[in-house]
């Protein structure tokens, strides 16, 4: 059977399949964007303990992910091999995800244990539903070209899920948790003095909203893209926040303030330092002077760049947000939505590709087939390099704007510009593949071009926001097709393995892909932290010239190396589209003969 005779999937089924990745990213991107913040600033666990937890749990993933792939490959039901896991696991996925963002009031040691248990369970149930979901793409259709289209739908939904998480999470947390009186009440005494009164235990965010004193715009601020960034920032308001923990006496040393902060000590630093209070149960009342917390000092070395300042002649508005209840309600909404979307994916898809042989394959043989499969190793390296560079650069953005540009207000618009054009690149993947002639050529060329958009950030002046926005928008579009291509290649590799070895282990191939994805995020995040430390970074102080050079490197040539390596690796990938057409055609002929033999038996 020629591949051109294989009927293409309807858009309705492709869209239905893509909903599963939107569902996955409701939790995956929440952990990426807010996981560390939730555990440290909301739940009250020391940062060192959280970092260790993230690392330790990844060791279990090395066993858990391939094991799930092996199990799903050996599942046989009336719904298929992989599709039934969407039905079986959507409820545990939502329930355990909600538990992971719940905040029982127990000792810090108890919180760490609770976090280990729920986070590990969440990663396990994520694996149990996401690996079969990913493998499902490989059996929806035997058409290699159609899989590229399916992958495009999938990653468009994945990026849409990430945008949804970015846009909804914190506003929803603030909305649900606003005007809370469960932990503390706040009373004003005078214009800028507050009295915190104990009501219970938990975590709240005290948000002070000041009027701002706007300096005259500099030339760089008058440029078009800065004005665009102001759409996301109310330039007449300034928000300052301080977190207040009210816990029992059982607290670890790491979460206690190292020293008492005063107006004089804060004034020694060139930037304001936000105050955080760790208060024992029974503190009753605490007075807070907002000027002590948020006293600002313009660094005399910052020539030519002026930032907004608090207008201390205007009144301040105070909001008290219970972040614990806010996160619980928000994640509860995400959980319900994710469960519904996974169920819709189950209803709207069908497995069509079945192994060409009923011969039983041993686990050892399947593992050997995977680890000795050269195309799989190459694509795994491509995915690892791609995700690691994304994580390194994403983690550097706030540092770049805070310490180099010296203004974080354009950062949100900068990130959004890259994310939106990234989504456009994903949507254009199918068309671009046809234009470039193959997935391999598109991946190689666009990896190198993406690196080219990063390198100038080493040399761009701090006042040239317009060029920064243009480059990140172009880079976002160019990097958009990279992830869909990688996952489409994994489906091709499963076909190639069946064609060459006679057995099919789609779930195992995709489980290894999922683990590579997790390791890319983990290594990228760790590398960003290690490199910052190596360049001498210390938070909330004026950075040395060496540290600024390091921050610019994290935005430019270091992630660019990851792109170049990924683009170079794909050169050695031999499963081009023409060869895969032959593979698919021969597999379909083999399956057709077996079906005919079974029918006549």
Image (cartoon, rainbow, N blue to C red):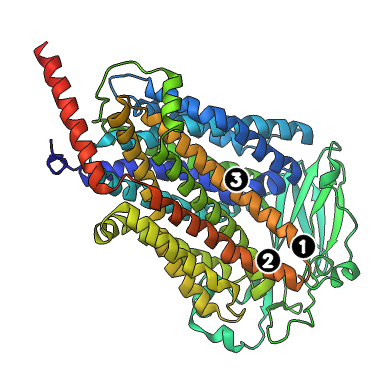
* C-alpha span from label 2 to label 1: 9 Å
Residue 99 occupies which quadrant of the picture? top right
Query: Which disc, if any, is residue 550?
Result: 2
Q: Is residue 564 above or below residue 353?
A: below
Q: Are marks 2 and 1 in contact (CB under 8 Å)?
A: yes
* C-alpha span from label 2 to label 3: 20 Å
Q: Is residue 88 above or below residue 310?
A: above
**Residue 598 percent location from the top left of the image:** 15, 15
**Residue 492 percent location from the top left of the image:** 32, 40
**Front disc: 2 or 3:** 2
**Residue 415 percent location from the top left of the image:** 52, 64
**Residue 94 percent location from the top left of the image:** 49, 34
Neighbor class of circle 3 (other Cα within 10 Å; few <14, some 14-19, many 20+) is: some
- Quarter containing the C terminus: top left
The kind of secondary structure element at disc 1 is loop
At x 23%, y 31%, the residue is 352
Residue 320 seen anywhere in this rendered image of the structure: no
The kind of secondary structure element at disc 2 is helix
Query: Which disc, if any, is residue 522?
Result: 3
* C-alpha span from label 1 to label 3: 22 Å
The kind of secondary structure element at disc 3 is helix
Q: Which residue carries the number 1 mark?
A: 536
């Amino acid at each position: 059977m020629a591949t051109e005779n294989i009927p293409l999937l309807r858009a309705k089924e492709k869209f239905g399949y893509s909903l599963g990745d939107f569902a996955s990213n409701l939790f995956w991107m929440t952990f990426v964007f807010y996981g560390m913040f939730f555990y440290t600033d909301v739940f009250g666990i020391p940062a060192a303990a959280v970092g260790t937890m993230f690392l330790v749990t990844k060791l279990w993933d090395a066993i858990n992910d391939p094991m799930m792939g092996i199990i799903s490959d050996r599942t046989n039901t009336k719904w298929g091999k992989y599709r039934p896991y969407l039905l079986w696991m959507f409820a545990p996925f939502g329930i355990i995800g909600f538990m992971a963002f719940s905040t029982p009031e127990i000792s810090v040691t108890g919180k760490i244990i609770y976090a280990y248990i729920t986070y590990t369970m969440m990663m396990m149930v994520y694996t149990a539903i996401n690996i079969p979901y990913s493998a499902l793409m490989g059996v929806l259709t035997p058409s290699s070209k159609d899989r590229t289209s399916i992958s495009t739908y999938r990653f468009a939904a994945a990026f849409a899920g990430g945008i949804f998480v970015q846009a909804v999470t914190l506003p929803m947390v603030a909305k649900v948790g606003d005007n809370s009186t469960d932990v503390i009440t706040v009373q004003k005494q005078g214009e800028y003095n507050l009295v915190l009164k104990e009501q219970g235990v938990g975590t709240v965010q005290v948000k002070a909203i000041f009027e701002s004193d706007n300096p005259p715009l500099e030339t760089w601020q008058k440029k078009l893209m800065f004005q665009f960034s102001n759409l996301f920032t109310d330039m007449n308001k300034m928000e300052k926040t301080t977190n207040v923990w009210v816990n029992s006496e059982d607290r670890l040393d790491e979460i206690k303030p190292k020293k008492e902060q005063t107006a004089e000590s804060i004034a020694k630093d060139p930037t304001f330092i936000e105050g955080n209070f760790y208060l024992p149960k029974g503190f009753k009342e605490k007075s807070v002077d907002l000027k002590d917390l948020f006293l600002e000092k313009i660094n005399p070395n910052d020539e030519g760049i002026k930032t907004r300042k608090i207008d201390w002649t205007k009144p301040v508005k105070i909001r008290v947000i219970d972040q614990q209840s806010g996160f619980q309600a928000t994640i509860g909404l995400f959980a319900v939505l994710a469960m519904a979307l996974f169920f819709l994916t189950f209803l709207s898809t069908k497995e069509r590709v079945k192994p060409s042989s009923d011969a039983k394959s041993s686990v050892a043989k399947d593992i050997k087939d995977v680890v000795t499969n050269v195309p799989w190793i190459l694509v795994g390296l491509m995915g690892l390099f791609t995700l690691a560079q994304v994580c390194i650069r994403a983690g550097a953005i706030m540092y770049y704007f805070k310490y180099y540009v010296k203004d974080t207000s354009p950062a949100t618009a900068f990130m959004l510009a890259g994310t939106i054009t990234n989504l456009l690149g994903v949507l254009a993947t199918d068309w671009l593949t046809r234009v470039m002639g193959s997935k391999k050529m598109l991946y190689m060329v666009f990896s190198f071009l993406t690196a080219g958009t990063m390198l100038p950030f080493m040399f761009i002046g701090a006042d040239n926001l317009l060029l920064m926005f243009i480059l990140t928008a172009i880079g976002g579009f160019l990097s958009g097709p990279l992830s869909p291509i990688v996952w489409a290649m994994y489906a091709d590799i499963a076909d190639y393995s069946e064609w060459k070895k006679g057995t099919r282990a789609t779930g195992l191939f995709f489980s290894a892909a999922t683990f590579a994805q997790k390791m890319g995020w983990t290594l990228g995040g760790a590398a960003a932290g290690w490199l910052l430390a190596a360049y001498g970074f210390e938070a909330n102080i004026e950075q040395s010239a060496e540290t600024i050079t390091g921050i610019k490197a994290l935005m430019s040539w270091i992630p660019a190396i990851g792109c170049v390596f990924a683009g170079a690796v794909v050169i050695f990938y031999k499963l081009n589209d023409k060869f895969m057409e032959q593979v698919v055609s021969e597999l379909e002929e083999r399956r057709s003969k077996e079906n005919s033999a079974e029918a006549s038996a």
